Amino acid sequence: MTLWPHWIDNRREVPRDFTETTPIYNPSTEEVLAEVTLDDGTALEAAIRAAASAFPEWSATPVLERARLFFRYRELLERHRQELAANVARENGKTLQDAYQEVGRGIEVVELAAGAPNLLKGEILTEVAHGVDTTMVRAPLGVVGGITPYNFPAMIPLWMVPLAVVSGNTFVLKPSERTPMTAMMLAELLAEAGAPAGVLNIVNGGKPVVDGLLEDPRVRAISFVGSQPVAKYVYETAARHGKRVQALGGAKNYHIVLPDANLEATVDALMGSAYGAAGQRCLAASVVVAVGPVADVLIDRLHAQGDQLVLGPGTDPRSQMGPVIRDAHRQRVLSFIEAGAAAGARLIRDGRAGVPERGYFVGPTLFDQVSPDMVIAQEEIFGPVLSIIRAKSLEEAVHLANRSRFGNTASLYTQSGGAARYFRDHIQAGMLGINIGVAAPVAWFPFSGWKESFYGDLHATGRDGLEFYTEKRVITERW
Ligand code: NAD
C-alpha cells in the first residue's frame, strides 16, 4: 500500500518512523487509494523549519518576481485542470464537472495574487507637519499555517496559499487527512512554476498537527476552514498563542422562495445547491422557507427532479451526484433523516433507498412540514437533505432564518426588487444570493459567513486576504 508523503522543501517526504496511518478512500467505490500517515510532530517541525529558513530570502524577493511566479502557476494549473479535477473527484467523490469548476475557482485566486504589485502598494501623505512625511508599507508576517477541510481539496488551499505566498510569507499547509492528494499536486505545480524550496510545505495529520501549528511561536497566523466546533477551537487556541487567525466554520443555509419567483430557474438553483456535491458544501441549501402558496408546486417539482438525478461515482462523467465522504458520515446523514421523520416532518423523498450498492451514497432527500425547532432545521447535516418550512410572509421567513446560530449564506428567489432589498438589509448572513443557488466565492471579494460560521475579522480572499497575510508599518520621517 502506498504511504502518502508530506511535502517539505519541495520534496516528497515519506515518513520512516510513524505510529499511525489512516486510509484515503475513493468514497465512490470504497477502494483504498493510499495510507496517509498522521504526523506526530516530526514532519511538522521539519516543515516549520523549512518555511522559517525560506522566509528571509522569499520575503526579500521583489514583489514583481513573486507575482510572476503566480502567472506561471496559473498557466500550469490551467494546463493540468482536468487532471486536478480528476484527483478531486477521485478522493472526494464529487462529480468531474463540479470538481472542474472548483479548480477554476481556485485559479481565480491565483489571478488575484498575480495582481499583487498593485494590491500591496502602501500609502503616503507628505507634509503631515512642516518637512515631515508619513508612509505606510505592508510587510509579510513570516510563516503562516493553513488547515483545510475535505470538501474542496483544491479550492480552499488555493484561497490561502497564493495570497500568503505572493505577499512574501512562507506556508505550512495541513490538508484534510481524508483528501490530502490534490494538495500534493498543487504543491508540485507551484514548485514547477519556480517556488523556492520551503515556500510551501505540507504536513499530513489530524489534531496533533493542528495543535502544533496553533502553538508554535514561529507560526504567525492561521487560516482555518472546517466545521464550527473546530473553527471555534482553532480561533480561541491560536488567539491565546498570540496569532492572527481567520476561522471559517460550518453552516445551516436558508433559502427563501417567494410566490413571484421564476419557478423553473428556482427549482434548478435549489437542486444544484441542495444536492450538488451531495450537500457537502458550506453554501449548500439546507432549508427552504416557502412563502405562501408556492410550497406545494415547489415540492412537486423538487421531488420529480430528485427522482431524475443520476447517482454514481464522481469520476464517471455520467454521474450527476456522487457519494458523501465516508461511511461514518453517511450514517450521520441517515440519522438526521431518521430524526426528521421521528420528529413528525413529512418525508417526501427518502434518500436511504435506491442508491448504488458500493460507495457511501445517500440519495436526494426532501422533507415537508418541517418546523423551525426540529433538529433537521437547526443542525448542519452536510448531506443531500433538504427541509421545507412554510411561512406566511417574507418578514416571517427572514425572521426564521435569522434564528439560526449560523450565518454563512442565504438566498432569496423573487422578481421583486423591493423584496430583494428587504432581504439584503435584514438577513444575518455573510454571503447572499438573490436568484442564485450557490453564492460562490468570487476571488476579488472577501468570502466568509457571519455568526458561528466565522471566527475572526478579515475574511478569506479579496483585499481582506492580502490584509490578513500582511501587517502595516508606518514610517514618519524628516530630512
Ligand atoms: P473538520 O472540522 O472535521 O476538519 C477540518 C480540518 O480540521 C481538517 O484538516 C481536520 O484534520 C482538522 N480537525 C478535525 N478535527 C479537529 C480537532 N478536533 N482539532 C483540531 N483539528 C481538527 O471539517 P470537514 O469535515 O473536513 O469539513 C466540513 C466542514 O467544513 C463543514 O462543517 C463545512 O460547513 C465546513 N466548511 C466551511 C466552509 C466555509 O467557507 N465556511 C467551507 C468549506 C467547508
Image (cartoon, helix red, strand yellow):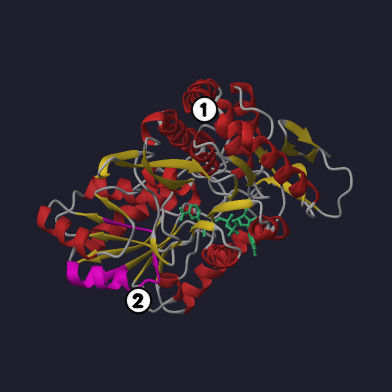
Task: Relative to 72, say whether 335 is above or below.
Answer: below
The residue that mark 1 highlights is: 66
Image coordinates of residue 218 in percent, x first then y, are 66, 51
Q: Quadrant of residue 243?
A: bottom right
Q: Quadrant of the N terminus?
A: top right
- Of badges 2 and 1, nearer the viewer stands 1
- Three-letter amino acid code at the position of disc 1: Arg
Left or right, 257 with reference to 156: left
Q: Which residues are magenta?
A: 389-411
Ligand 1 quadrant in view: bottom right
Task: Relative to 4, say whether 326 is above or below.
Answer: below
Left or right, 49 with reference to 195: right
Q: Quadrant of residue 32?
A: top right
The residue that mark 2 highlights is: 371
Q: Are marks 2 and 1 in contact (CB under 8 Å)?
A: no
Front residue of 211 and 270: 211
Left or right, 410 with reference to 220: left
Question: Which residue occupies 67% across, 60% down?
Answer: 215
Front residue of 340 and 252: 252
Question: Which residue occupies 64% across, 26% down?
Answer: 191
Tell me the SS state at disc 1.
helix
